[in-house]
Each structure stands twice: as structure tokens, then as C-alpha cells.
Amino acid sequence: MYPPVCPLCGRISPGGICPSCREKTVPAADGAFCMHCGKPLADEAAEYCPDCRKQMEGGGSCLDQGRSLWLHREPVAGALYRFKYHNRRRWGRLFAKELANSYACQVRRWQTDVVIPVPLHPSRRRKRGFNQAEILARELGARCGVPVRTDVLFRIRRTTPQKALGRADRMQNLKGAFGVSAAWKPCRNVLLVDDIYTTGATLEHAAKVLRKAGVQNVRFLTISIGQGI
């Protein structure tokens, strides 16, 4: 009943993202990028972005590495907003297909044992009706041949929406927000999946509790990432 449309512009497009919109997207790894989080770098000689460099100097990160598809700007930003808040959950399969096309080989190089979506608090999930990260993770796992677990990582404390907070406030806001199932036997390599990487605070806290549970390596993939400097 509903013809397939491009998730970025909404026009009919049997192949997913239409050629016009694909030309407007900016790949996150186009040119120099941070070796830790994948943000683009203005200085091609730099190894890390300013945020990751500060984090390394301040004691390091619980995340080993991560990559994203595109910079978080239009038309990607609007499409992800509609995906999450306007119930365009069917677009998750298209976004996950794009992730798999770009990073399936990287997922294998990371020797990924399990894919885990960043969870929503139960109250937020009930309100939204779905977890966008879970849709992405399930499709990505199927395409990469890696099992997906949604019974491992939980949001155990409801937090203030992160959008209006800076990095320091985001980190404080997320303290104690995640928990790991005591019944889970930790594996070596976990891949976290989420829709957007802004400051990395959410993924960092999720990685921290997984590390405490016994996971050795935590990587991430997201659809979009902040531009960085």
C-alpha cells in the first residue's frame, strides 16, 4: 500500500536513498578523521579530535573505537528526527543497510561477538513505541551474521533529555543510568549501536558498565556524528 520512499527527502525511491540526497550527505570518514570516535578533523596531521584528546589525557575512554556513516547535518539530521519521533521505524532497515554496506568488513575485523543496541528507559520506550537503536542493531546483526542481544544492557534510571546539555552535564546526567544483567556471561568484543553520536556521553557510560561486567573491548557504530573541529 505504501511505496518505498527515500528516508532523507520522502520522495518515492525503490532503491532507498535517492541519488539526489546521497549527493547531499557528507560521509563522516571522508578525509581525515579521529582514530577514536571517527569525527572529521580539520588538521590532517592530528590523530584525535579535541574531545577525544582531552579524554585520553584525563584517563582514557571505555570505548575502544567507533565509526559513523554521515555528519549530523541536513538532510540526515531531519531524517533521523522523523525516524525517532514521527514513527518512521521502517526507515531503520534502510539506515542499517547503509551501515552494513559501509562497515560490515570493519565489524568482522573487530571480531565482534555480539551487537547490543543502546537501550531506552522503559517509560520512554512505551511513549515512543519502539527503540530506534534496537531496529538498527537487529538489521545490522542479521546482515553481518552477528547475534544481537537486547537482554544484556538496560536503562535503569530515567534521565533528562541530552539535547540541551553540554558534555560535562551529559556525563553527570547519565551517572547510574545503565545496568547489565547479572545472568549474562560477558564476551570479549561488543559492538554498541545507536542512531547519533554527539559528545559520546551515552555510549561512554554504556561502555563503562559493560567493561565493569567483564567485556574486554567495546566499539560502536552510529548513523550520524557531530561535525567536530
Image (tube, rainbow, N blue to C red):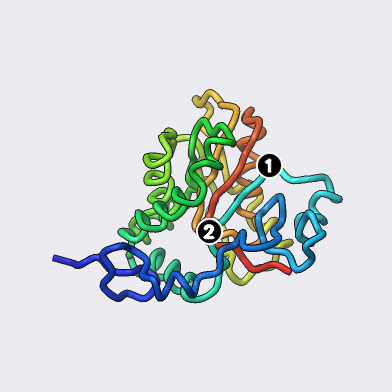
Residue 73's spot in the image, x, y percent? Answer: 54, 73
Label 1 belongs to which residue? Answer: 64
**Crowd rating for badge 1 (residues with CA inside 10 Å; few <14, some 14–19, many 20+):** some
Closest to the observer: 177 or 71?
71
Asked if the residues shown at circle 1 and circle 2 are in contact, with their CB atoms under 8 angstroms apart, the answer is no
Q: Which mark is residue 205?
A: none
Q: Earlier in the sequence, mark 1 or mark 2?
A: 1
Residue 44's spot in the image, x, y percent? Answer: 77, 62
Closest to the observer: 68 or 14?
14
Specify the quadrant that holds the C terminus: bottom right
Q: Measure the alpha-carbon separation of dots 1 and 2.
A: 18 Å
Residue 50, compared with residue 58, is above or below; it is: below
Which picture quadrant has residue 13? bottom left
Q: Tell me: 90 left or right of 108.
A: left
Residue type at mark 1 is: Asp
Q: Tell me: 211 left or right of 221.
A: right
**Crowd rating for badge 2 (residues with CA inside 10 Å; few <14, some 14–19, many 20+):** many
- Residue at (68%, 63%) from the top-left corner? 40
* SS state under label 2: strand
Specify the quadrant that holds the N terminus: bottom left
Residue 161's spot in the image, x, y percent? Answer: 55, 65
Q: Which mark is residue 69?
A: 2
Residue 164, compared with residue 107, is above or below; it is: below
Which residue is at the far left? 1
* SS state under label 1: loop
Residue 110, compared with residue 38, is above or below; it is: above
Residue 54's spot in the image, x, y percent? Answer: 82, 56
How many marks the image carries: the answer is: 2
Residue type at mark 2 is: Leu
- Residue at (53%, 40%) from the top-left corner? 107
- Residue at (32%, 74%) from the top-left corner? 10
Closest to the observer: 16 or 187?
16
